[in-house]
Structures are given as C-alpha cells and as structure tokens.
Image: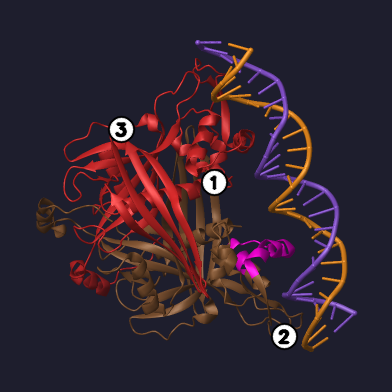
Chain colours: A brown, B red, C orange, D purple
Amino acid sequence: MINHIISAEEKKFLKNYDITAYDRPSLTADMAVFAIRSGSEQPEYRKDPEKRLGVLLIRRGGHPYKDCYGLPGGFAQKQESIEETAKRELKEETSVDNAFLEPFGIFSRKGRDPRGWIVSNAFLALVDAEKYRVRPGSDAWEAAWFFIDLEVEESKKHVRRDSADITTLYRLKLEKEDVTISALVKETRSFAGHLEKTGYEILEDEGFAFDHAEIIVRALIALRERTARSGRIVFDLMPEYFTLYNLQEAHEIILGEKLLTPNFRRKMAPFVTETSRQVETGAGHRPARLYQRNMEAFYDKSFEY
Amino acid sequence: MINHIISAEEKKFLKNYDITAYDRPSLTADMAVFAIRSGSEQPEYRKDPEKRLGVLLIRRGGHPYKDCYGLPGGFAQKQESIEETAKRELKEETSVDNAFLEPFGIFSRKGRDPRGWIVSNAFLALVDAEKYRVRPGSDAWEAAWFFIDLEVEESKKHVRRDSADITTLYRLKLEKEDVTISALVKETRSFAGHLEKTGYEILEDEGFAFDHAEIIVRALIALRERTARSGRIVFDLMPEYFTLYNLQEAHEIILGEKLLTPNFRRKMAPFVTETSRQVETGAGHRPARLYQRNMEAFYDKSFEY
DNA sequence: ACAAAAGTGTTAAACTTACACCCATGC
DNA sequence: GCATGGGTGTAAGTTTAACACTTTTGT
C-alpha cells in the first residue's frame, strides 16, 4: 500500500514539468569481467600450468579511442534499471550471461569522455573462464582476455600537523599474446582533520580507452578487499566442480600471497561438499577430489569467513 | 603522460557526435545523513538520557510529494562530479559541511520518480549531531532530525531444489516531536544456481517521498555492515573529544546489541588517545575521561578491527 | 548509603598460525 | 626413486567472550 495520493494539483505540476529543461548526463554501465585463467602451456611434465587473473576487454573499432582497449559496457536505456543495463550489455558484447555482478563505483569526473557529460556505473563481474570462450568479434568491437598484473610501484606517507596524505602508485599491466597495455594510477588517501577521502588520478596511459585504466585498478582493489573480507565471492570464479587447490589458487592470485594449505582447507570445510568425483588422472601426481559449494552454508546469512 | 593522440578523424567524429540524440536520465545525489542524538530529557537524576540514531530529512514544500519527507539531495550539474554534487547539495540544504560521505547504492528503478527518468546516487553521510543544529528552513524545504527505528518484522527462508529465497520484512519508523512516518520494505535475497542477487520492494509507505523509504533502509543496512566490519566509520559520528562509553553507545545503537565494556575498551585502546580532560562533572557518578582519535592508527593502512 | 556510570583483572574457550608429516602418481 | 601436487595432525600463540570486581561521584 503506497498511500501517496496524487492530487489534481500535483497532476498539473507533473504535466507541466519539463525534464529536458535541465542539463542531463548520459549514463553507462561498464563491467570489469574477471576470471582465473591458465597461463602459458604446461612448463614440464608433472608441473601444472601457472594460473593468472584475467580481465575481458574490448578493442574499440570506432571512435573515440579507436583501437584502444576498454571495458565492455554501454548506455542505459530509459525503461531499464542500471543493473539491467549491465546484464544486457554484458551479454550483447561478450556473451557472458548470468554472471555475478556487483556495483563498485561511479565515475563522473569532468572530461572523462570526450563525447561529453557521460557518467559511468562500474560493475565487478566474476565468471568461470572455461565457460566463456570469447566470440570472434566484429568490426565494431572485438573481445579478448588479458592477463593482469597490478603492482605497487611506490607508497608514500606524508604526515603534517593536522592532516596526512598517503599516496600509492599502481602500475597496471595487461597483456595478451601480441599486445601489452600499461598505465600508472595514483591513489591519494587524505585525512584532513578527521575526514578521510580517497582520490585517483591517471598519470600514464598507454592503450586504454577513456579512464578505464583507473576503473580497472579500482575494480581490482575492490575485488581484493571483498576477497579479504569474506572469500565467498571467490566461488563465483569457480566452475561447478573444483578442487580445493583450485580454490586456494584463486584466493592466492587475488590476494597476491601464498596461503597455508592445511589452514585454508579447514577454513573452507564448512562451505564445500566433497563429491565422489576426481579430477582426471595422468598428471604425475595424486589426483585431487572434486568439490561443490555447500549451498546450505551460503543460504545462511551468517556466512562469512 | 596520457598518450592517446586525437587524430583529425577522431576530431571530426567528435564534432559530429550528437549526445542529445540518445535518451538520457537526470542524475541526482541523495544523502542519508546520520547522527547519534540524545532522546527525551533526563529521566531522573544520575541516569543519562537515552541516545538514538537520527536521520536528517527534508519536508518537501513543492511538488511532487508535497508535504512528504525525503532525503536531502539534488540534481547533478554538468561541470561537477557526483561526489561534488553530494557535497554541494548537503551544504545548501542542511548546512552540513565536510561530513564523511560514502556512496552505497544506485537507485534507478523504472517509475521511481513521477517526473520521469531520474537516477539517484545515494550517499551515506555521518556527522556529529551537536555540531549541526538544523536551520529554520524556508517554504521550499525544511530540514528536521528524525529518530530511527528499524525492525525485522518477518524473515522467511524458502529453499527449493536448486535455488532459494530469503525474504526479510523491515519495518522502518521515523519520528520527531509531532510527526511519525513509517514504511514496510521487503528484502529478497535469491540464490539461483550459484548466483546471488538482492532486491528490495516497498510494500507500505506513509509519508516518504519517492522511494526514499527504501533508500533509508538500505542506508541503515549499509551502515550496520560497515560498522560490523570495521567500526572505524563510527568515529565519524563522534565529536572531537568523546568518552569511551559514548563510542560504545554509538556502536550499540548501530549494531542493535549490547557490548561488554571491558572487551570493547581493550579493542578500542589502539585507536584512541587519552586526554587530560574530563567530562564536566555533576552527574552523580564518576566523571569519564575524554579521548581523541589516535590519528597515527588511522593513517595506518592496516587499521581494521 | 546507594545507584549509576567509569574502569580493571582474570580465566576459559575459540580461533589462527606454523610446521611436520604421510599419500598417490607417472616418468 | 623422486618430484609434484593432494591431504592430515598437532601444538603454540593469539584473540575473544564472559564475568567478577573496584572506583568515583552527588544526592
């Protein structure tokens, strides 16, 4: 029961209301699609291929930023919510359907798009890489997986009387077979009085469209934070059946640190169920058991680890 | 060094690009401003007045939703980022300057505003209530603090073969001296396959403008989550000097549960510094020491508790 | 004295960390 | 045999939760 009754007066107001009298931005949804992908071919018998984090980018076939790489995304349409825009564009551009989608930032800085006032809602999307082989692409765009490398190049703390700045320089490097693109993004966390603020600036940019280098850096930071906080999100990068070591690898890749296997397994135990399946053998070492998510644990609101 | 060189061809493209050819939404920033406020007057000598969580609302003087209460906020302007919009509008409408501001959601559901396609970016704002007494207001709007009461009225879990829904009914009640407004908001967390989604719906609404009842509920949920996660955010609700019990009260009000004093103090110890000041005496009990934030701990990136 | 709030100390339980160890496999 | 990944057990260290207890104040 929504009990706001629209009066005759209000009806008249709405009839005369001209929304086009005000300046309006265009609105887009941009998706940072991540997956865990196997790196180069098997280095030697018995050693598994190294895995890395991948992000799905689109080579722009048209202006602006022709031939640069940007995130998949597109303009919001009038009859849909922004989540629907994200879902629709992701499917249209990359054929990725039903991915985990979570908003992580709004990008509205003046001048970020040469076409004019365009505000972007950025979404984190996590998929199982095996499931989504990219389509050939067309003139207008061509999708491709890039391996990600994000490193802190420098970190400085500058404390003054009643304020402080912490600046961090992130070097973002994305590569696929024949292409490497790179950017340098500065993060500034400033504390003035007791107020905290975080800002980003692109210092170098080679090959990215718009401010997408910054969006990717912030997407990665968001992914790390969420993983450190609860790890539940990592399951969205997994296929239906996975080994515990796969899961551990995914955590390690995102967090950028090695974990201790016995402890990791104990922590995960409540959230997975063992299946009778095994990974195909032939690898020169004991075959691993395959696990599934324990959905019961996920339904439980207290699920956090 | 941004090395994207704009070619003559791209210049021509941009010159001919007509952004107005596409449908565009209006964009607003809406702020959920929270503070801890003393409730009714001192119930008896020696007993401190009860404290409650307050939210700052605006009584709408004009259409649409005339005489309803909504969040402070307003339209984004072309030359500013959405964070600047939030800051500017907050200052204009409520004279709150320099508050902690954090985005927590995008509200873009079709039909949420009778004026047309209007997308709102919602921000959490935390202030020290003592510092911000509301201004008298004008014809167009009048700001007022409401006490908040959010309760779970019902919670249901519905598990099927390969999917599950968890629905929660939240009763939101806001009151000030002479006014009570109320709403019932349904949260649906659904798991289909391994995909999680959360949706909200307003079931009852008495006195709120637009979908602001839903925004307030989600702001409160965001505030609770953030507090449970790290507590650092609670300091933004505190004045410069505060007692440890004040801080504990704030935590208790947000989380909706009592905490054990000795444990709370131990946890907080690294993040506060004792001052020589005491709270003015005369209350019939031992006067409390006043503390300040320990800024050093805040500057430390590892600060989480 | 006493009620209310301020503040400290002690202990058991729970969780985390680190490391040592065994298993299975294919060349 | 041996390198590689799969997998288990245990003990020390740390954190958390619970509760009992002392202090200070104004009527």
Residue A183 horizontal/vertical position (percent): 46, 63
Q: Please name which of the two marks, 1 or 3, marks the residue nearer to the observer.
A: 3
Image mark 3: chain: B
CA–CA distance in space, label 1 to label 3:
33 Å
Residue type marked 3? Glu
Q: Dot 1: what SS?
A: loop
The image shows residue B178 at horizontal and vertical percentages of 28, 34
Element carrying mark 2: loop
Q: Residues within 10 Å of mark 2 (few under 14, many from 20)?
A: few
Q: Are marks 2 and 3 on the same chain?
A: no
Q: CA distance from mark 2 to mark 1?
A: 45 Å
Q: Position of residue B181 (x, y in %)?
A: 30, 44
Q: Main secondary structure of the magenta part?
A: helix
Specify which label sits upstream in the sequence, 1 or 3.
3
Q: Is residue A256 magenta?
A: yes
The reply to whether the C-beta atoms of the residues labelled 2 and 1 are less than 8 Å apart is no
Q: Residues within 10 Å of mark 1 (few under 14, many from 20)?
A: few
The residue to which callout 3 is attached is B177
Range drawn in magenta: A249-272
Report how far apart the C-alphas of labels 2 and 3 lie in the structure: 72 Å
Give the residue pinned by disc 2: A281
Residue B140 drawn above or below residue B184: above
Q: Chain ID for label 2?
A: A
- The answer to if B56 sits in the magenta stretch is no
Q: Quadrant of residue B17?
A: bottom left
Say which residue appears at 58% left-offset and 59% top-offset: A303
> Disc 3 on helix, strand or loop?
loop
Q: Which numbered disc covers residue B159?
A: none
Residue placed under numbered mark 1 in the picture: B230
Examine the rendering and report whether any part of residue A68 can be seen: no
